[in-house]
Amino acid sequence: QVQLVESGGGVVQPGRSLRLSCAASGFSFANYGMHWVRQTPGKGLEWMVVISNDGVNKYYADSVKGRFTISRDNSKNSVFLQMNSLRAEDTAVYYCAKDHGWFGDLYFDYWGQGTLVTVSS
Amino acid sequence: NVLTQSPGTLSLSPGERATLSCRASQSVSSNFLAWYQQKPGQAPRLLIYGASSRATGVPDRISGSGSGTDFTLTISRLEPEDFAVYYCQQYGSSYSFGQGTKLEIK
């Protein structure tokens, strides 16, 4: 069965960096696009970024463009989110999600359980 | 494309019919509209894609309809496990989510 397991969340000071990981299993990871989505009580679900199956194509939401970077390692069935210059408003539960297609332009058919990031001094 | 869901909260009893609405500010390309269910402490679960296609394992009492800017999720006979928060999402032009409808037990 498909499993997505996020890790790397925690408490971080404003302006610092954090790297999230998502380990995938149960499907041919190299054949699918992958997303990061975050959720806050105030703003609900917010899509942040997608990476195509081969890692070549990446698209970012304006809210994180220039601060966050997505990458993947198909040999390790993992996708990563490097978050720099963190702000209080980045506090959220971060989910990785599998796209139904290879490019990453379809719906999200599986989600991980999420990892909590708290940005606070 | 901003998605607006209504109502914000829906209070119903098991066995009743639930109708949830999702309205888009612009036409959703190719009816690329999905619905997700989320229970407390859990990740969202895909229910419907392409406005009306059920995901694997979704019971047939749950159905999606609509096109253009107006979409509906219908649960014909509510079961106890259906009480949750429901989100619509469009994936026709980038991605955006509605703010959610909480379906609670009356």
Image (spheres, helix red, strand yellow):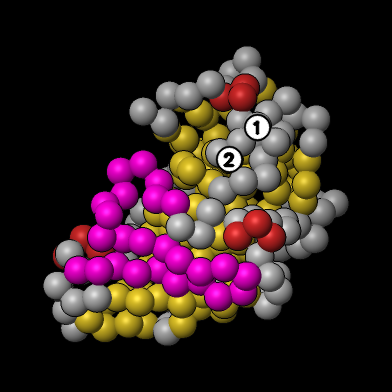
The N terminus of chain A - image quarter: top left
Could you tell me how far apart the alpha carbons at marks 2 and 1 are, in whole angstroms?
7 Å
Q: Residues within 10 Å of mark 1 (few under 14, many from 20)?
A: some
* Looking at the image, residue A28 lies above or below residue B62: above
* Looking at the image, residue A51 lies above or below residue B64: above
* Looking at the image, residue A116 lies above or below residue A74: below
Q: Nearer the viewer, residue B42 or A102?
A: A102
Residue B97 in the image: state x and y as whole percent: 58, 65
The answer to whether A55 appears left or right of B80 in the picture is right
Q: Residues within 10 Å of mark 2 (few under 14, many from 20)?
A: many
Residue found at x 25% / y 69%: B76
Residue found at x 40% / y 75%: B20
Would residue B49 be seen by someone viewing this image from the given angle? yes
Please state the extent of the stretch shown in magenta in the rendering: B53-77
Instruction: Give, as a three-letter code, the residue at label 2.
Output: Asp
Q: Secondary structure at mark 1?
A: loop
Q: Nearer the viewer, residue A11 or A53?
A: A53
Q: Which of the numbered marks, if any, corresponds to residue A99?
A: 2
Residue B31 in the image: state x and y as whole percent: 60, 60
Residue for badge 1: A102
Circles 2, 1 touching at the beta carbon (< 8 Å): yes
Q: Secondary structure at mark 2?
A: strand
Q: Nearer the viewer, residue A17 or A20?
A: A20
Any magenta on residue A117?
Answer: no
Q: Chain of mark 1?
A: A
Instruction: Give, as a three-letter code, the residue at label 1.
Output: Trp
